[in-house]
Image (cartoon, grey):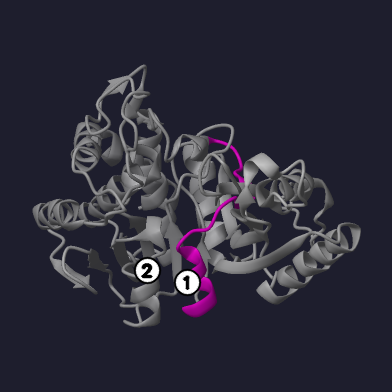
Amino acid sequence: MAKANWHEQIKRATDSRRNEIIDFTKELIRTPSENPPGNEAEVGKIIVEKLKELGITDIQVLEKTPNRPNVLAKLHGFKKEPVLMLNAHIDTKPVGDRDPWSVDPFSGAIRNGEMYGRGATDMKAAAAAMIIATSIIKESEFMPGGTVLLAMAADEEAGSSFGVGWLVLEKGIKADAAIVGEPSGVNESFEYLDISTRGLYGFDLIVKGTQMHSSLSDLKRGVNASVKLAKILSRMQTELKLTYEPSPFCPQGVTINPGVFIRGGVYYGVLPGLCTAGNDIRTLPRMSQEKVREDIDRWLDRLRAEDSELDVSAELKVWVEGAEIRQEEPIVKSCARAYREIFGHEPKIGMFPGGVDARFMINQGHFPAVSAFGPGLLQLAHGPDERVPVEDIIRATKVYAVAALDYLGISKGA
């Protein structure tokens, strides 16, 4: 069998199962798995049933706590190794306010070639594509030279302490390489092959003032904590300078988001004596929390020197470490070849703007993981009318099957 021919056979096999891929994606979207509160039991059950229907029977369901399943399934080749993990998370962000939605958020409705619903792009389309891609490999005449490990994980949207973080850190789940199917489009669906992921430094700024009767604020000396904090937030994006090594894969560098939430004060009639703002900084790989803290403290010291009445402190609340792999990694090359085969041009190599489960694989599991390589636009995730191009769900299925066989190799008899 000519090697060039196996690509075409995989593509034809995928096209023949187009309706199955679409219907399975719809079924996943129609099964709520919002996090919080966090309950992937029903969608996990559907995935297990589908795997059995497809003849993929080496299945484990691992739960740190009830109703938080991680579904692991293996397709064995003519050798046990290498092991390639195909990873998608099966939880979603909550729908929130339904009024801005033009469709039922759990409908899987298709309009103008796009499938709508919570989790459509983040990331049930990728989950469906990875599962069917593994089945297509199984049903083909090409036996992989290693193992495909499907890892359909819980809890990514709330930190992964019940999902990939737990699987890697406490259960010792490993692979030789991984592909994470997060939506990698910024301007167009499936735009990037992301080989790194940014981290997060989430911190509170706490300003203390003078709680007193507000009718006397122009007669008696008092400090309005909310006004002081507002002035700090208005200066943060332009004046807070962070130390980091630039990356060619993230030209925007570090992103600073002041005041992602604000709380303080008591009620009308009371000058606010305390005000707190949460802030998030999207960090680059190799940035340390210690260095970020030093930069913040240095900036706050300067503000205190300018204003003797300013009583402000910073408290770290969330630290997520960034992660990256080398562009020369075999899994990156396999993904690039698969992308070129399906899309007809080279992918853009990039960095995922947020934080994803690949960080656990890279930093703690010590195996290379493509951080994001999946259908959809990231900007549509988490919001109303989340949607994904139907054609890109089909393309994703082809890409994952071709990339897996490219990385693992195929049997000599095929």
| Rendered location of residue 365, percent (x, y) | 46, 78
Residue at 31% from the left image edge and 59% from the top image edge: 414
Q: Mark 1, residues whose alpha carbon is within 10 Å: few (<14), some, or many (≥20)?
A: many
Disc 1 target residue = 360
Disc 2 target residue = 164
Q: Is residue 351 left or right of residue 131?
A: right
Sequence-wise first label, 2 or 1: 2
Determine whether the residue tagged by mark 2 lies in a helix, strand or loop.
helix
| Rendered location of residue 366, percent (x, y) | 51, 79
Q: Is residue 329 rendered magenta in the image?
A: no
Q: Residue 118 carries which label?
A: none
Q: Is residue 355 rendered magenta in the image?
A: yes
Residue 65, image quadrant? bottom left
Vertical placement of residue 176 versus 103, above or below: below
Q: Which amino acid does label 2 sit on?
A: Val
Q: Is residue 307 left or right of residue 55?
A: right
Q: In front: 130, or 99?
A: 99
Q: In front: 394, or 197?
A: 197
In three-dimensional space, the C-alpha distance between marks 2 and 1, rounded to whole angstroms, equals 7 Å
Quick check: can you spot residue 243? no
Q: Mark 2, residues whose alpha carbon is within 10 Å: few (<14), some, or many (≥20)?
A: many
Vertical placement of residue 284 versus 394, above or below: below
For the record, the magenta segment spans 344-366
Residue at 34% from the left image edge and 37% from the top image edge: 96
Residue at 25% from the left image edge and 30% from the top image edge: 108
Q: In front: 109, or 366?
A: 109
Vertical placement of residue 251 versus 100, above or below: below
